[in-house]
Amino acid sequence: MNIDENTLRSFGGETIRYKPKEFVFKENEHSLYYFQITSGKVKLNTYNENGKEFIQNILGKNQSFGDPLLFIDRLYPTNAVSLETTEVIRIPKNNFLEMLEKHPDISLEMNACLSQRLYYNSLMVRNMASQDPIHRLQGLMDYLKSYYDGDCQHCFPVELTRQQIADLTGLRVETVIRTVKKMVNNQTIRLDGRRIFY
DNA sequence: CCATTAACTGGTC
DNA sequence: GACCAGTTAATGG
């Protein structure tokens, strides 16, 4: 979701800066705001019982997070942590809902946005259930690419470290590294230095 | 530069 | 594949 900055401000939106590795919110906290990233990156993660990190998603510029929680009365299922110096605009929950009432167009877009997330999430879950690491990586990249505008072959830059890919897919770094090489041979992806293009 | 972080390799289970 | 150990390459102050 990407809402016009001025509109957000007119409904009480304020800019907040986060240093790298700072929590924007933590698991089980109450949802109070809509967040939209102006610059930087934020990851949504959880930790399993063994302390192993699982990343649900990594969001960048012009992307929102925490918004599904604005419509239901539940606690955050994940942490939100900035990966680098990050600037977000946040607007209080009630103001956000008020904004939707006064801007039906935004409300409609919000529906489309949430629907698309659901759609790609289901594809994601499907691929993640696969034992084959190639399918897991490909599923992840399809998902990431769904946020992306361009449409040419092998031109979508995957701005993730191998470790982050591992934490997103539940695989080990070493497995990701080896799988990436297989996929390069498959022509599924392309490398520019270390950066992956899908 | 040096120190830190990320990418890679090989081997065991 | 996970997990561990050790090396190499890249990054950044």
Image (spheres, coloured by chain):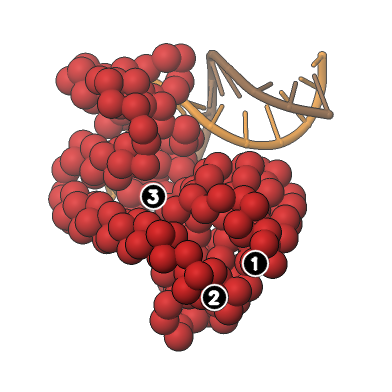
Chain colours: A red, B orange, C brown
- Indicate left or right for A22 with A48 as reference: right
The subunit carrying tag 1 is: A
Residue type, numbered disc 3: Leu
Q: Quadrant of residue A183?
A: top left
How much space separates mark 1 and mark 3, taking CA atoms? 34 Å
Same chain letter for marks 1 and 3: yes
How much space separates mark 2 and mark 1, taking CA atoms? 8 Å
How much space separates mark 3 and mark 2, taking CA atoms? 34 Å
Q: In the rendered view, tell whether residue B2 sits above or below residue A56.
A: above
The residue under the point 36% across, 33% down is A149
- Indicate left or right for A176 with A20 as reference: left
Q: Which residue is mark 2?
A: A98
- Which of disc 2 and disc 3 is earlier in sequence? 2
Per the image, label 1 sits on a secondary structure element best described as loop
Q: Which residue is mark 3?
A: A168
* A146 vs A26, nearest the viewer: A146
- Which of disc 1 and disc 2 is earlier in sequence? 1
Mark 2 near mark 1, Cβ–Cβ under 8 Å?
Answer: yes
Per the image, label 3 sits on a secondary structure element best described as helix
* A150 vs A58, nearest the viewer: A150
Residue A192 position in % (x across, y down): 42, 14
Same chain letter for marks 3 and 2: yes
Q: Which residue is mark 1?
A: A11
Residue A143 position in % (x across, y down): 30, 44
Residue type, numbered disc 2: Glu
Residue A153 position in % (x across, y down): 25, 20
- Please identify, in this view, whether the residue under mark 3 or under mark 2 is nearer the observer: 2
The subunit carrying tag 2 is: A
